[in-house]
Every structure is written in structure tokens, then in C-alpha cells.
Amino acid sequence: MIHLCFSFRNRVGALLTWWLTFGRNLRYQFLLLYTLDPNLLAAAARDVTTAVAVGALRVGSRSGLPLHHYPLAETAAAHDAVERGAVGKVLIDIG
């Protein structure tokens, strides 16, 4: 069995048994940004936020793909939404 582990500021954030997700239409996306200068990250976040605010970067239903957010505590409800055939992206907010 192979596990994928990621951390946030040297604390374990999750342990994923990745092979169990094969064939279940699940996808994990990660960006490794911890090596970047914090000032660069802040500038990038401001730029993306501005682009979304002025409509230069369309997200969610404005781009034709509804987003359904669920807090981590409601992971079961998010799973139910996927099982019911939710249209768009079902997202679990962990932060």
C-alpha cells in the first residue's frame, strides 16, 4: 500500500491512500509553493484576485462550471453531491 502525505509548515496535513482513488473520477491537485519568497506569493495572490474581480479570469458559473463548496466537516455531504451527479466541481475547503 502506498500513501501520499503532504504537510503545511512542517505539520502533517493529510495522509492519502492514492491507489484507492483510481477509477473513482477523483483528482488531487497540488502546487508546491513553499519554496517561493512570501512577497512573490502575496503579489501573485493579489494579481489573481484582481483578475477575477475585473472579469479577466472567469471562474465558477461565470465560466460555465458551477462550483459547490463544502467545509471539511461536511465531506460526506460533498460525496453525496458527487454520487447524485452534481454538475460542476465539488470542492472541499480544508483551510
Image: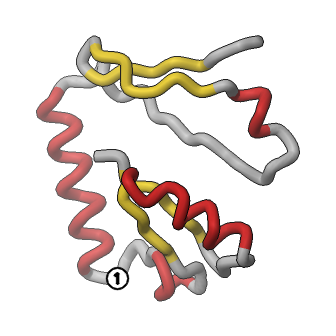
Residue for point 49% across, 73% down: 68
Quarter of the image where one finds residue 79: bottom right
Looking at the image, residue 95 sits to the left or right of residue 93; the answer is left
Q: Amino acid at mark 1?
A: Gly
Identify the residue position indicated by label 1 in the image.
55
Quarter of the image where one finds residue 16: top right
Residue for point 45% across, 27% down: 14
Who is closer to the viewer here, 80 or 58? 80
Q: Quadrant of the N terminus?
A: top right
Residue for point 29% across, 60% down: 48
Q: Position of residue 49 (x, y in %)?
A: 24, 64
Residue 81, above or below 9: below
Q: Position of residue 25 (x, y in %)?
A: 78, 53
Looking at the image, residue 50 sits to the left or right of residue 85; the answer is left
Who is closer to the viewer here, 60 or 71? 71
Question: Farthest residue in the right direction?
Answer: 23
Residue 28, above or below 35: below
Instruction: Check disc 1 and report its element: helix, strand or loop.
Output: loop
Who is closer to the viewer here, 55 or 90? 90
